[in-house]
Image: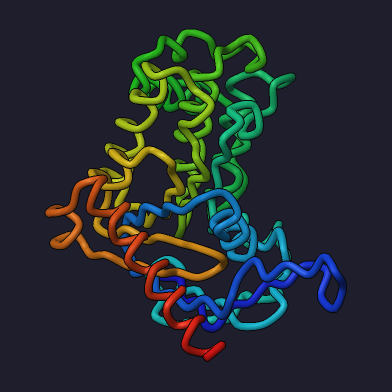
Amino acid sequence: MIRIENLGMVFSPGTADENIALNNVSLLVNPGDFITVIGSNGAGKSTLYNAVAGTYQPTSGHIFIRTGDTNTEREITREAEYRRARYIGRIFQNPLLGTAGKMSLEDNMMLCYHKGYKGLKISLNKAMRDNFRERLRELDMGLENRLSDNVELFSGGQRQALTLLMTVLSKPSLLLLDEHTAALDPRNAELIMNLTLRFASEYHLTVMMITHNMNHALEAGNRLLMMDRGDIILDIDAAEKSKLTTKDIVQRFKDIKKQELANDEMLLG
């Protein structure tokens, strides 16, 4: 569970370049939620992710998390990014960012197991390699036969699929997907999307997914958020989302902007 309370992010405050990237955002992400996040460039989507992951420290507000089976909520607003990486997974648009290209596939897999494993240290042995092969077969890409190959030899689709699998196996409390299919060709993009939906269901993941693909935004998950100018302007549940079309979403956005303009004109009076 993630609870965000009045989160603000201001870049270059007090200068001519001041930019309010997040404007007192509040959000509750429940365990098992799969939330699709849409909005134009500059709406605040990636900034929100950076604040949750710890890449940026917010100007104001608070972030709380409840991990694993515990019922205890704790604040992580100022916690370092590397500490949050133990329970917050993130996959970026660039498929090269999630794996170490100069390392072998089995060494990459070991890194994810060390991250997700909570007990004594584990070592690479036959049993681990057999486990890796079993997991890699889930991707249906033949990677189970390439454990000793360096990952830089793999295609973008293979590397993104591997990144997804490794992140899932590290058992994150929250998985942040930052346009993770956008840089792939249509075939691989659909493959990665199908794997995402399957893993989210099988591993009972809590997911937030930024996407510009309106079909994915409407068809995937149980909630849809729309952001604009650092605000969450729509939060639509599964029942309502199932009735909407792309045209409906566009019209909702236009209606909100029209109302904002009318409010501004009233204030200027």
Observer-nearest of 215 and 145: 215
Q: Position of residue 224 (x, y in %)?
A: 32, 58
Observer-nearest of 61 and 63: 61
Q: Position of residue 40 (x, y in %)?
A: 50, 50
- Residue 100 occupies which quadrant of the picture? top right
Q: How is the image coloured?
A: rainbow
Tell me the residue at 52%/82% (across/down): 5
Observer-nearest of 237 and 195: 237
Tell me the residue at 58%/64% (across/down): 52
Instruction: Tell me if residue 201 can be seen.
Output: no
Instruction: Tell me if residue 248 can be seen.
Output: yes
Badge count: 0
In the image: residue 137, left or right of residue 67: left
Tell me the residue at 55%/47% (across/down): 90
Q: Position of residue 197 (x, y in %)?
A: 29, 39
77 lies above or below 247: below
- Residue 24 occupies which quadrant of the picture? bottom right
265 lies above or below 216: below
Q: Where is the N terminus found, in terms of image quarters? A: bottom left
- Residue 119 occupies which quadrant of the picture? bottom right
Q: Position of residue 143 (x, y in %)?
A: 46, 13
Q: Furthest-front residue in view?
A: 269
Observer-nearest of 148 and 260: 260
93 lies above or below 149: below
In the image: residue 53, left or right of residue 259: right
